[in-house]
Image (cartoon, rainbow, N blue to C red):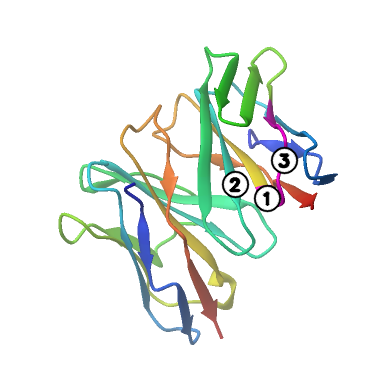
Amino acid sequence: SQQGEEDPQALSIQEGENATMNCSYKTSINNLQWYRQNSGRGLVHLILIRSNEREKHSGRLRVTLDTSKKSSSLLITASRAADTASYFCATRRGSTLGRLYFGRGTQLTVWP
Amino acid sequence: EPEVTQTPSHQVTQMGQEVILRCVPISNHLYFYWYRQILGQKVEFLVSFYNNEISEKSEIFDDQFSVERPDGSNFTLKIRSTKLEDSAMYFCASSEEGLIGEQYFGPGTRLTVT
């Protein structure tokens, strides 16, 4: 399987701390996308990083991609209680027409 | 900001009944997708749709499932004869570009089959 796999499965931090979540995958990819899901709700697109990119920023989010290690990380700086959610990485292979493969996600809890 | 919408938010149906889940993708998007998430499990791809035909489907998307774009705005998923194991959250997504673009997801329809 070339689905993304996130770790840790669960992460609990205090407000103001940084949260780092990792994702690994098994086959070559076209791009990798990170999503957030609040409990029982829809998936919110956070950031897309292409296979020829190494790092991308969006507000308090920083995503890195290491294609040699087949891994990505999502860093949320200065976390807030509102960041509490599940975070998923999803990979897209070059040979498919857009199908995303999701990992199991990291459940992030930020305590006020 | 444009967003994908889905109706209904929650559908309860009896086993063997047909259900239609509806989605309105973002208006200038050309690629459409259905995914599902069984409670506590990964989000799984069902089908992608482009230019009025299925581009790709997963092994989950068997003969009980069908998709349609009946007009210029709606995109539907039909399950002909629901089973208990079809109970899940169903997400519609759309994308401006197929291979390289971001996929934007709707809020989901929670389908409960009793």
Q: Quadrant of the N terminus of chain A?
A: top right
Front residue of B5/B81: it is B5
The picture quadrant where one finds residue B29 is top left
Q: Which residues are magenta?
A: A73-86
The residue carrying mark 2 is A36
Mark 3 highlights which residue? Answer: A79
Q: Are marks 2 and 1 in contact (CB under 8 Å)?
A: yes
Instruction: Identify the residue shown where x is 42% and y is 40%.
Output: B103
- Name the N-terminal-most of marks 3 and 1: 3
Residue B108 in the magenta stretch? The answer is no
Q: Is residue B38 above or below residue B16?
A: above
Please, what secondary structure does the residue beneath circle 1 have? Answer: strand
Q: Pointer 3 indicates a residue of which chain?
A: A
Residue A70 rendering spot, x and y as whole percentages: 68, 21
Instruction: Single out the mark in the foreground, 3 or 1.
Output: 3
Percent position of residue B1, x then y: 34, 46
